[in-house]
Structures are given as structure tokens and as C-alpha cells.
Amino acid sequence: MPHLIPVNDSGNPSLKLTNSSISVDFMNAKSTVARPRGRRPSVDDFDLRDHMLDVAMQLFAERGIAATTVAQIAAAAGVTSAMVHYYFTNREQLLDAIVEERLAQVIAFVWRPTEPQIENDPFALVAELVDRFFDVTHRMPWLPSIWLREIVHEGGLLRERMVRRIPLEHVGRFAERIRGAQQAGTLNPALEPAFLFHSIIALVMLPLATAKLWQSARGLPPIDRDVLHRHVRALLGSGMQPPAAAPRAPVRSPRRPS
């Protein structure tokens, strides 16, 4: 029976969202990270500044940062331009706040500690990372578009800010775990450990970021998140399997000279 990535019907454990900044101890497996928030809070807990950030992210994902004005953000948020300037002063401070209070939370959520049984099982570890990406993109549907438009592309206005935040130590540690599993014979030796995390990001984020493009093409079905989720886990789970040992060719008796 092949060792496929397990499907967790219950999903990730419920985590409480807060408006305050989050603190993460990556060495403590019991520490928790608040799931990044992506929607307007309830009336009882309404925070105007957070609301303006959420609106700005949505507009940036739809139009691009360079094509979005403060007046458009204010109108969509139901406030005046002066109110936006009051909270963020200028565009640069608004972008800093987006990185600090939205995108940094995504990084912390994806790399929050896992249980030892997941940490020590490369198949479960990859499945967990995939699940976290689908979790956070469901919570923040603007994220894939922002990732492609403003971080991946040359000239993206969040690119330099995010490059400085790449968690190299976590990516490197993940690659080392994959390499160790290869050396133990439990993973496909043809995989490049340093590229596996890149592959996970691309398999999840690129289809979601280009979903509208595919939906506008005739004859192509819309991208279904659940189907894509299942597809990514199946693709990675099968691709990580070590190749089956080739059957030995039967040993032929040497020919006798005629």
C-alpha cells in the first residue's frame, strides 16, 4: 500500500483571531499562532483601521497597488481620504502596515510549530503545509493575487519588503528533513529538497491567482478549491514515493558453444 499524504477531514485546529500582533516561539511546539484574519470583524469588535487594511488589500488584489488611489480605498471603506491619511499618513506607511499586520501573519501561520508525529513524517509534514496554504488562502482570498502581482513579479511594490521576510531558516530546516528522509530511503531520491517548498507554493498559489483567467476561457471548468486541494495532495503524495524496486531479470544459463 503506497504511503500517500493523509487527508484530514477535520482540518486544522480552531485558533482564535485577535487584532493585536502575534508572538511566535518556533522552538516551542505548544505555542500557537493566530490564524490570519481576512474578513471584516463583527460590529461588536469593529476596528476601523483593520477594516481599511482589509479593503486596501482587496482593491490591491483586484487592481494592483499602483493603480489604486487613496480616494478609492476611502470610498470602498466608507470613510474620507483624510481618515485614511490620519491612520497611515502616506502610501509607504500603508504598505508597511500591510506587510507587518497581514502578510507577516501569513508567514507565521504557515510556519507555526507542528506536533512531533507530523514533524517526523515527511508525508504528513508536506500535507500539513499544503493544508495551511489552503486554509490561509480561504481566509484571505486576495492573497494569491497579491502574491503573484506584487511579490513574484519584478517591480511589484511589496517585493522588496517581502524578500527581507523570507523565513530562510524554516525553509532550510524543511529541506533538511526532506533530505534526511531521502537518505533513509522513504522518499523519492530524484526530488530536490531545496525545491519542494517552492513546488508547494506554486501548486497552491498559481492556480488560485489565475483562476479568473481560466474561468474566462471557453471550455475550461472553473477552478474548484476542494478539487485543487485534493489534486495537490495526490500529486505530491505520489511524487514523493520512492520508486518501486525494479524486478530482477532472470539469470540465463550461458550458452554452450555449438
Image (spheres, helix red, strand yellow):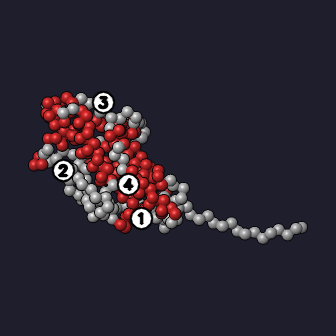
Q: Is residue 43 visible?
A: yes
Q: Could you classify mark 3 by the number of other residues whose Cα lies within 10 Å: few (under 14), some (14-19), or many (20 or more)?
A: few
Q: Which mark is residue 170?
A: 4
Q: Secondary structure at mark 1?
A: loop
Looking at numbered disc 1 in the image, what kind of residue is underneath it? Asp
- Residue at 72% across / 69% down in the picture? 251
Q: Are marks 4 and 1 in contact (CB under 8 Å)?
A: no
Report how far apart the C-alphas of labels 1 and 2 lie in the structure.
Answer: 33 Å
Looking at numbered disc 3 in the image, what kind of residue is underneath it? Ala
Q: Which residue is mark 2?
A: 20
Report how far apart the C-alphas of labels 4 and 1 lie in the structure.
Answer: 16 Å
Q: Which residue is mark 1?
A: 121
Number of marks present in the image shown: 4
Q: Quick one: quadrant of the C terminus?
A: bottom right
Residue 20, position as x, y percentages in the image: 18, 50
Q: Are marks 3 and 2 in contact (CB under 8 Å)?
A: no
Q: Which mark is residue 219?
A: none
Residue 253, position as x, y percentages in the image: 78, 70
- Residue at 23% across / 52% down in the picture? 22
Q: Nearer the viewer, residue 50 or 203?
A: 50
Q: Earlier in the sequence, mark 3 or mark 4?
A: 3
Q: Which mark is residue 66?
A: 3
Q: Are marks 3 and 4 in contact (CB under 8 Å)?
A: no
Q: Could you classify mark 2 by the number of other residues whose Cα lies within 10 Å: few (under 14), some (14-19), or many (20 or more)?
A: few
- Residue at 48% across / 55% down in the picture? 193
User: Picture quarter containing residue 16?
Assistant: bottom left
Left or right: residue 226 versus residue 94 is: right
